[in-house]
Image: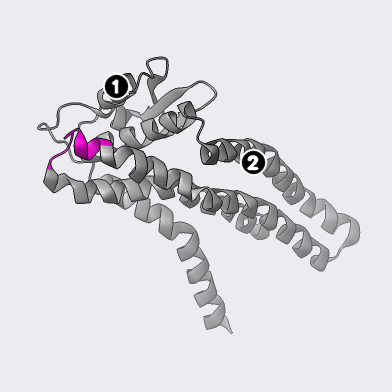
Amino acid sequence: MVVLGALVLVVVFGVVFGPQLWVKHVMKKHAVDRPDLPGTGGELARHLLDEVRLGHVGVMATDGGDHYDPGERVVHLSHDNFNGRSVTAVVVAAHEVGHAVQHAQEDPSFMRRLAMIGNLAWVERVAMGVLVLAPFVFALFHSPALVVINLLAGLAILGIGVVVHVLTLPVEFDASFGKALPVLEHGRYLQERDIPAARSVLRAAAYTYVAAALVTLLNIFRWLRR
């Protein structure tokens, strides 16, 4: 029974951490400095936005991770990708510009995703509220079963975030392979030998949000430990 429990734990942690570790590995692997590339990630993002007449969309370095902010209409790049001259830097920049293009075109899938993501904030607040109530439920009713039900409800609500990101993966893949890859290939911003690496980075970029959402499920294990 102990062995089975350990195996289940390994599988759970593999499912939760595996995607994020893979994303980080791919990004790091192709983040080697490449002086032969024509520009940094930030410079390419600015250039691509100007090329499609999105001069009003800004490009900024951030500590908050690579993302496109539809509210501010700004492409945010990590400092490494904004200032870096690597395959990862330019590919991630092209991916985030892809989201800006989707927004400008009012792509239906992107707009639906935008609405769904906008609702995730209150969903996460509800989940955390449910988890916070767990100790009080136990104190009031002295029932481990009710606490488990309470925690499972919190897990289910947190899981909505994972489901949303999985359902909106087509938007991420369109930004990667429908928008960014054709531009990188046809614009010759990368050498032919770099395209396989670019595909790997674009695939990792598409799964970034799913990987991050899975890690949020670990909140339930922290509460179980407490």
Q: Which of 173 and 5 is in front in this view?
A: 173
In the image, residue 127 above or below residue 63 = below
Farthest-out residue, bottom: 1
- Specify whether 109 is left or right of 146: left
Mark sitting on residue 180: none
Q: Quadrant of residue 66?
A: top left
Element carrying mark 1: helix
Mark sitting on residue 51: 1
Work out which quarter of the rendered image holds the C terminus and state it.
Answer: bottom right
Distance between mark 2 and mark 1 Cα atoms: 33 Å
Counting residues from the start of the chain, the first of labels 2 and 1 encountered is 1
Element carrying mark 2: helix
Percent across and percent down for residue 116 are: 62, 41
Q: Nearer the viewer, residue 201 or 21?
A: 201
Magenta span of residues? 183-191
Residue beneath the point at 16% across and 45% down: 194
In the image, residue 172 above or below residue 153 = above
Residue bearing the label numbered 2: 120
- Amino acid residing under circle 1: Glu
Percent across and percent down for residue 56 are: 42, 15
Residue 199: in magenta span: no
Work out which quarter of the rendered image holds the N terminus and state it.
Answer: bottom right
Coloration mode: one colour
Percent across and percent down for residue 55 are: 37, 15
Residue beneath the point at 71% across and 48% down: 127
Residue 190: in magenta span: yes
Farthest-out residue, left: 36
Q: Is residue 86 visible?
A: no
Farthest-out residue, right: 141
Percent across and percent down for residue 115 are: 62, 36
Residue beneath the point at 59% across and 49% down: 164
